[in-house]
Structures are given as C-alpha cells and as structure tokens.
Image (spheres, rainbow, N blue to C red):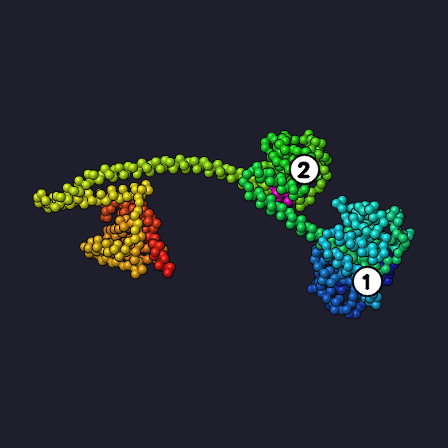
Amino acid sequence: MQRQELSIAAQLHLLIVEDVKADVDLMILALESAQIAFTYDIAKSQSECQHLLQTQTYNAILADYRLPQFTAYQVLQILQASGHEIPLILVTGSLGEEAAVDCIKAGMTDYVMKERLFRLPVVLKRSLQEFELRRQQQQAAAHTQLQAQQQAIINHIVHAMRETLVLDEVLQITADMLHQALGLSRCLISQPNSQAQMGVYHISAATRERERLLGHECSLYPFYKDKLLQGEMVIVRDMDENVPMAVRDAAGECNIRALIIAPLLYRQSFLGGIILHQCDRERDWTEQEISLVRAISDQCAIAIHQVQLFSQVQQQLHRQQTLNQISQALNSILDPDFILQEIVRLTGECFDVDRLLIFSVDTDLVQILKEWRANERIYSMLNLQFPKSEWVDLIDPDSDFYCRRYFHAPDYSQLPLTRIRQMQVEQASTRSVLSVPIFIRDRLFGGLSLQTTNTYRTFTHEEIYLLQQIADQAAIALYNAQSYERLEELVQQRTQELEAEKLVSETANRAKSEFLSNISHELRTPLTGILGFSGVLMEQIFGSLNAKQKQYIECIHTSGKHLLDLINDLLDLTKIEAGKEELTPETLSIEDIAQACLSLFQERCRQRGLEFHLAIAPEAITCTADRRRLNQILVNLLSNALKFTDTGSITLRIEQTSQQILFSVIDTGIGIAIEDCEEIFQPFHQVDSGLNRKYEGTGLGLALSRRLAQLHGGDITVRSELGHGSCFTLCLPGSREQGAEKES
C-alpha cells in the first residue's frame, strides 16, 4: 500500500496533447480534486508533441484521440520512437468504448471517456503503478529463481485452466494452487449471483470450515465495490486504525488479519473476485505476490469469459438442434392430433419443466388439449375447460401475451388471483409459468404453457425466444395439417365427381361406337348395290350408253366409292377408339413395300405431270408392322401429297436410325400453315373447309393414319410451310434384330 502511494508521491510532470482549452481545464480540475501534485505542458500539434518528447521528461501523457491533422495513434508512434516508457492514456469523448479498447490493444495504456473524467486520477494512478511495476520487474531481473517459480505457478494454473472448459474445475484449481503457492489461510473466489450479490462458490480445499463458508455472500465486497468495478485491487496488510471500522468488524467475524481482493475483470465486464485471507498474522504482501495474484486474476477472468462463451455456444447449438428436431418431427406429420402430442412431448423434455400444456382458445372457452408431465405424481390438467373471461391476458389486446408474444410469471402466486389462478396454485401446485401464443394465419389458435410445480424458475430470454420459435413451427405444422385435411376432402370429392363423369363418358363413347358401327354397316348394304349396278352399266354389257348417260353413271360410281371409303374410315376409327383393332405384325421387306407404292402412284403422278422419287437408305432392309395397315398409312400419305401438289415432285424416302424406321412423304405442294399442323390430325378437319373448297376428301385420312401409327408404337409428324410443300414422316419402332445389328 505504501509502495503504491510512493509511486505518485513526488510531483508528476505530465504532457497533455489537447487542442481544446476547456477539455484541458477539466482534466486539470479532475487531477487536482484527487490531490495529485503535478506540472504539465500542452501540445496542440504533432510537431509540438514530438519536440516536447525530445526535450523534456514526463511521467505520463494524456492525449485526445482526434486533433488537427493527427490522432492519438501518431502520438503513440512518437512516444515509441522517443524510447520513453511512460503511460499513454487516451482521453476522448468522440470514440466508442470498443474503439477505445482497440487503441489499448495497439499499445496505449488505458482510456477515460470525457464524460467520466472523475476516473482519470484512478486510471492515471493505475497506469503509473503498472509502469512502476514493470520497471521494478525489469530491475528485479536478478531474482531469476523467484520469478521462475512464480512463472511456473502461473503456467501451471493457466495449463490447468486450458485443460478443462468446466468452469467449476477451473476456479477450484485456481483457488487450490494459490492457497498452496502463497501459504494462505484461505483462498476464495466469488461470483455474482442472479440478484447481483457476490457469493462465495469456490474455496481452496485446504481451508478450515470450508463447508460453512461455501455459498455465503462476500461480506467485504460492498465496502470495496466501486474500487473493484474500476479494476483496482484491494490490499490490506493489517487491520489497523487506517482501515474503516465496518471493514474491521466484518473481517473480525472471519478472523481476517490481512487480505487481498483482486477483481476478475474482462473488457469492463465484472466477473467476480479472487480473495486471499491471512488469519494467523499480519502480512506485508510483496510486489511479486501482488503481481502474481494480478496475473492469475487476469488469466482467470479470461478463462471465465471463454468458458461462458463456450457455454453460450453450446446452449445455442443445443437449442438449435432441439428446434431442428422438433421442426423435423412436426413437418413429417400431417395428423393435427399427433402433432399436438409431439409438441408437448419434445418441448417438455427440452425445457425440463414439470408440466407442459397446449390450450386452444375459442369464442368463450379455454380448453387444455394436450399435456406432458415429468411424472405421474404431477397434477393433470388435461381436458379441463375454463371461461375465457377469467384469463385476462387472453381478452386484453394490450397484454404481454398479445404484444410481446409471451407471458412470464416466475412466481405465479404473486399475480392477482382469479378463481382459475387460485385453483392452479392450490390444486395444481403451479409455481412458475411461461406461455407463448400460437397464431395460425394471424388468428389465435391457443398457446404453449411451460409450468413448474416443485421449484420457482425464471426463464431466460434465450428460453423465451426458443419457445416462441417452437410455437411458430407448431403453427406452420398445424396449418399444413389442416390444409392437407381440407385438400384430402377436396380430392376425395373431385375423385367421386371424376368417376361419375368417367361413367357418363364411357357410356356416351360406347353408344357412339355402337351407333357408328351399326349405321356404317347399314350404309354398306345399299352402297354395294349402287357400286355393283353402276359398274355393270359402265361396262355397257346390256347396251351402249350415250355420252351423257356414261358421264352420269361414272359420277354415281365415283361418289359411291368415295362414300364407301368414308364408311370404311369411320369403321376403322370406331374400332380403334373402342380398343377392338388388333394388329398382325410381321417382318416386312422395305423394298417390297416401296415397290408397291411406286407401282401404285408412279403412273398417277405421271398423268398429273409430277415426278415420283423413291429413296431407300442402304441400311433400311426390313421392318416389323401389320402389312395391310402399313400400306393403308402410306397410301393415305401419298394420296394426300398427290391431291395437294400441282407441280413439282413427290418423294418417298425411307431411312433407318438406331431406334426407328422413318417413312417420309415429301411434296412440293401448297403446304400447311404452322398453326394448322396439329389440327389436320383431328377427325373431319380439313384446311380447305369452305363450301367451295377446291380439294375433296373426308377429313379422316390423317386422323386414321396417326391412330394406326400409334397402335404400332410410333407416330406421324409433319413439317410444312405455306406455299413450299410438306413432309409427313411415319416413325415406326425398329425391330430387335435391327437394334442388335446396329449395336454390333
């Protein structure tokens, strides 16, 4: 104590780097009020500062952060370049505390905010003491053995701290080793409890009456609170008349004759204190011992902070894992009743409470829907109903339950007791309650309620936030389940409607097919007679016909054949749509099919002044198809090409790919508009459909051809441009033998 006072007993010579006179005056006033004897020089520029440090010797520098054309960082550089080892204290009002701490990390000794200049004398004293201690340590380099021993103790404690992240183990190891290293009567470590009181939770194992002292409040802390909060150590060598009577009385209760209290301070955060008791004698604490305690307290504060950070990270990780587990479980279920049961189970286990309830809220009643209890001895509230009017938080839109989205009562019995609350306290043994609402699409469904029945509990902000997140996940899961139920009802209803429509459609199709089949057969009978008699008349077996009669007979015969083609096409379509058409596939020679088409259409093309080309790829040898239906498709395609081509040529090109046989009919006719390329495959559809159309036809040929191609497992495609001809391609699957040949 005397040693520390001696360090500033002589008059100090200070360098104040500040350009505002009012701020200089305030600093001087703060130092004078603390009865510090000093002289000073003022530097307002970087050059002045550099000159003064080169020509004068100072005990400390007090510098503002921002000055004209330079900052405290330049002052630090000038000081370091000058070789002087003196404190540089930052006195600033425009810099946040975090930035000030960064300045300290850069090499500045300490900082004081201008609005708290009353701390300047303390900070100055502490800084001077730290530098004096540093000089003393440098001067004591000769005592290497003692220093090595002290360093070994520190290393041992630090190593022990790093070996475990269990805070109780860290603090107990520290107390035990300090007790042994310094020969103490007691070493205690105190920490603030939830009521901000300093409780003693760790005492060296060698301490007498250890069990009696554990858990008690530190009786000396209130007397030195302000000093400890500022990071200063309390050092008492003996309980003489210089020590306040209240302190002597408190110390006398524990037989304390000398003590040290070292604050555990980390970045302005007070974490507790290390308390050393000497009960058998007064003790002149040496600088080495004080330095050792200070060093260990700093390391201990860092260790406590790291353990707290690790604990926070672990808690956050556990909460996130719990939330993910609950979300995963809820989102994999579409049964609302099961969802509610899983919520209470998973949430109750997560929060380790005694009872968890899910309640619903309707117009008049609050009903307990689901319940989880830690054991069967806890009173059950399942299926109970209460009038909504007795739940103030549920009817008041300004309550915490609505506005802050939670209701928290660490002591439920302290609330105004309604009839329902009294029942909960007396009959259900409710001690503490945390409830959060469940809103589904901005409508209050009900809520989650955590309850304790054996102890009182104050839930943390993190626990409240986690419960709110669980409630949000529950709302989503319940909404999805309700939506799924409604969707299932709609699907079931629509399925029934579709089945009814399907029956109606099948009946209509069956009736249509039967009608077309019957009427087509009925039409064939008279047509046979018409075609037969007109054919006989055309042969003029029973006498010659004049030109007019011959013309009429030929017209009757042509019209009959056209009508017969129409009836045949109708019958084919009817059979295909009714699923009664059966193919007889066989392996066919492509050369034979092509020659049949050539013999049928080459002469007809020549009569129309058109060229007919046949192109067969060398690899196209055979195909598998129904001979009659394949011929029918190709004849339809070639007939259409012939019908709509006035000049140019018609080409039948046959190609073989790895998967298909391609029959392409290419013409140079009138072409088809792009928008009509799919419509032409519809029954009875013709591009030229007016009453005065130029090209005759039934409109069934292409429709029938595509249906037949699809029965073969293929299709018909078209590429065309109006005025530039068309290309119709029949695509049929290649035979297995062809595929094998291709692969080989």
Q: Is residue 58 left or right of residue 545?
A: right
Asked if residue 469 is among those painted magenta in the image, a careful observer would answer yes
Q: Is residue 263 left or right of residue 416?
A: right
Q: Residue furthest left?
A: 543
Picture quarter containing residue 518?
top left
Secondary structure of the magenta portion, mostly? helix
- Which residue does the image show at 26% across and 58% down from the upper left? 614
SS for tag 2?
loop
Residue 366 appearing in the image = no
Residue 703 to residue 613: above or below: above
What x and y, as percent, mark residue 641? 26, 52
Q: Earlier in the sequence, mark 1 or mark 2?
A: 1
Q: Amino acid at mark 2?
A: Asn
Residue 351 appearing in the image = yes
In this figure, which residue is indicated by the disc labeled 1?
Answer: 149
Count of numbered badges drawn on the protein: 2
Query: Marks 1 and 2: CB-CB under 8 Å?
Result: no
Q: Give me the disc on residue 14.
A: none
- Which residue does the image show at 81% across and 50% down from the upper left? 203
Quadrant containing the C terminus is bottom left
Q: Amino acid at mark 1?
A: Gln
Q: Residues within 10 Å of mark 2 (few under 14, many from 20)?
A: few
Q: Residue furthest right?
A: 241
In this figure, which residue is indicated by the disc labeled 2?
Answer: 375
Picture quarter containing residue 82?
bottom right
Q: Which residues are magenta?
A: 466-471
Q: Is residue 365 left or right of residue 166?
A: left
Q: Nearer the viewer, residue 36 or 147?
A: 147
What x and y, as percent, mark residue 382? 63, 33
Residue 586 to residue 11: above or below: above
